[in-house]
Amino acid sequence: MFAEFGYGILVVSFLVAMYSLIAAVYGAIEKSAAMVESSRRAMLLTFPLLSLSAAALVYLLVNNHFEVAFVYEVTSRSMPTYLKVTAWWGGQAGSLLFWAWLLAAFTSAVTIRKWERDIEFLPWVIVVNSITLLFFLGMVVFYENPFTRFWLVGGSVEPHMFAPLNATLFAAPDGNGLNPLLRHPGMVIHPPMLYLGFVAYVIPYSFAMAALITGRTDDRWIRLTRRWSLWAWLFLSFGLVLGGRWAYDVLGWGGYWGWDPVEIAAFMPWLTGTAFLHSVMIQEKRGLFKHWNMILVILTYSLVIFGTFLTRSGVLSSVHAFANSPIGPFFMAFVSLTLVVSIALVIWRWPILQGETEMNSMLSREALFLLNNLLFMSVLVVCFWGVVSPLASELFTNQKVTLGPPFYERATAPIFAALMFLMGVAPLSAWGHSTIQTLGRAIWKSALAALVLTVILFITYTQNYIALIGFFLIALVLLVTLQEFWRAARARQRAQSENFFTALTRLMGRNRRRYGGYIIHISMMLMAIGILGIEIFQTETQGALAQGEQLNIEGYTVEYRELASWPDEGEGVNYTRAVVDVYENGIYLGELTPRIDYYFDSQQNMTIPGNRSTLKDDLYVLLVDWEPVSNAGATFKIYVNPLVNWMWIGSLLFFIGVIFAAWPDRDPAEEPVRAARKAHQSSAAD
Amino acid sequence: MRKFLFILALLFLLGSPFTTTAFAQNNVPTDDEVNAIAHKLYCPVCESTPLDVCPTQACKEWRELIRSMLAEGKTEEEITRHFVDQYGARVLAEPPKEGFFWLIYLLPPAIILLGAVVLFRSLKEWTKPKTASSALDGNRSELSVKKDDYVSRFEEELKKQK
């Protein structure tokens, strides 16, 4: 009943989105406001419709309807209700529906706004969004239907949406259950965050396409979607960080980022999105690089679809799996088609997208921003090629290859270093014109202080030259950025006769984007401290210990005390937990309890580390193996991850920075109007 | 006595290779020695997970194989070659620098270099001072600036009227 209802609503949503597309195209070409309005209302209808369909799916998931194939694949009776709800995006078909539902929500939010000044954009924004929505709805309606049920046909069980001839509905007594690795709180919210980021990027793209089609070459589309881009970026970043934290907490390999193609799939749109955030400022301030911004937003959109394709089509495990996957070729065709059409539109509009002014100096802020874009694109090239070349190798040489962290680290480290250097220099350069002399005067104090700090680190902490270069750059960026806060607040303090903190808060409040950006730069440097720490200074050891025996590493002593193993039938898990005592230079610090959770239904282990985290380092202890009967001996793997906590502290500051920059404030242009209207109303009341 | 000591020393010297061999055979490689090699290898099943941290049974067996090969006195290179011969180049963290695989290493820097060249040429072009021959272009851009000023003023007026 609920399955038919959910599927029926999906089909209706598909038809409504199709109508919305046709009406929008017709309305735009025939200049029919009524048709455009009709298409807008149809688009608004897709969100409640898809919400109903999603509600039907969640109902089936929560109530153990194992006759539905998707429910059977991702839930089991032992799973708590909240996990059954979140299993919605835990499998292929559900996650595609989730994508479509989010897109319908965002498109509705966009179409609901007042369009007075930008009414010519409206039909084309609807067209682009409805094409994307139709693509995803098409996937779930025709190929990856989350409501498909099991039928008993002549002794065998087959998945079909509707009953085949002489078939009876078949419900398994229990489901497969969600992959235990995905049962972590971080993993519960990680995919929706990534998807929020992915889907939100469709909105700026749709406005960019609308601007190209209508030939409106001003930066209105950028201003209209500025906050969308920023929120999309925030969600995508949040998704990436949560994914990292999840890996650190449950994957048990002592790190948070393994340059896995699935991670890179989410990282690539982040790279172009970050380049775009910087590059749009040039268009807003100077009216330059209109072509480039278009290309960046198109690339971001394509990479969003490509990222979903990479993770959803099975292409990563093998190009042949991709060819056999029902949705893989369609994804590929959609990515290629939208990319080609979008680029064709840019080429068509090339002449009217010329810059409004000229570049004056190679060291101006706009030139440095462009250099920043080149560097982000360079990381993208490495990542894209790193993901694609193993597929190309399999396709052309029939030989699979692995591209592991060494490849990416070697290729991207110098680019990231250059980006950090730019982060230090660019805030000091001026729009329009800068010279070596002006930049040198602005930077020398910070550079000297950073150098002194580096020398101190050389004497007291490390002689590793890569680490020292990294720490120098981090110190440089931090000092330059803090100096910017200081300089501007002092200037305001003098001019307005305010105290320093009032001056600072007002200054930041008046220019949220700039100071939000600076907070983000500081947060990035804190994260860089964590990355340098774990990449360069991580140490590890492993050993089998009898009770009372010890392993030593970096001044720490880990002593094996005891081990216990017990099943939790209700949860479907067997816990094996060791207790170890930790000492640092002979002083007792406390106990850690690394454990391994074995999930009966999926026969899978989950390795949960015992972690002692400080600002100096993390002592990360893993239980690797144990003697099953006596528990007398156990094998432990221990990592010391210096400075890694700064990664998470930096992430928190990062979110504060983005929210600060994206926080809605009143459009200053509207204030006088609003004040005038209020004055008029009060005089009328008198 | 001196003769006795001499014979003893001789016996010790002759015997030392055997005692060392015997010691090597008893000396089981440590987990850290195994992991140092396993960290650079990937099994064909567990994609993107280095062998030293992979929790599956198959990877555990591979690690034990590394341990026994180390115990036999094999070098890291020999062990790596054994796995490559058995399972192909995909067990390595990076493909060998040969044949088609060169493309994997050379293409990204080539594209980045090309991007850099295009960017710097464009920057130079954009920041070049105007010459007499491009006076026409200058006029055109002046016109467009004027026009844009007009448009932005017009927009401002519209904004105020709203």
Image (cartoon, rainbow, N blue to C red):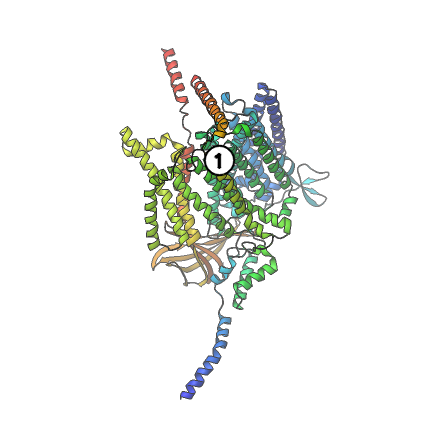
| Viewer-nearest residue: A190 or A49 | A190
Asked whether residue A63 appears in the rendered view, the answer is no
User: What's the amino acid at mark 1?
Assistant: Glu
Q: Percent position (x, y) of residue A137? A: 61, 34
Q: What element carries label 1?
A: helix
Q: Is residue A252 above or below residue A268?
A: below
Horizontally, residue A353 falls left or right of residue A437, namely right
Q: Percent position (x, y) of residue A72? A: 60, 43
Q: Which chain carries label 1?
A: B
- Quadrant that contains the C terminus of chain A: top left
Seen at 50% across and 31% down, the residue is: A290
Q: Percent position (x, y) of residue A514? A: 39, 34
Query: Quadrant location of residue B84?
Result: bottom right
Residue named by callout 1: B125
| Viewer-nearest residue: A459 or B134 | B134
Horizontally, residue A105 falls left or right of residue A506, namely right
Neighbours of disc 1 within 10 Å: few (<14), some (14-19), many (20+): few
Seen at 69% across and 40% down, the residue is: A168
Q: Is residue A359 above or below residue A415?
A: above
Horizontally, residue A338 falls left or right of residue A406, namely right
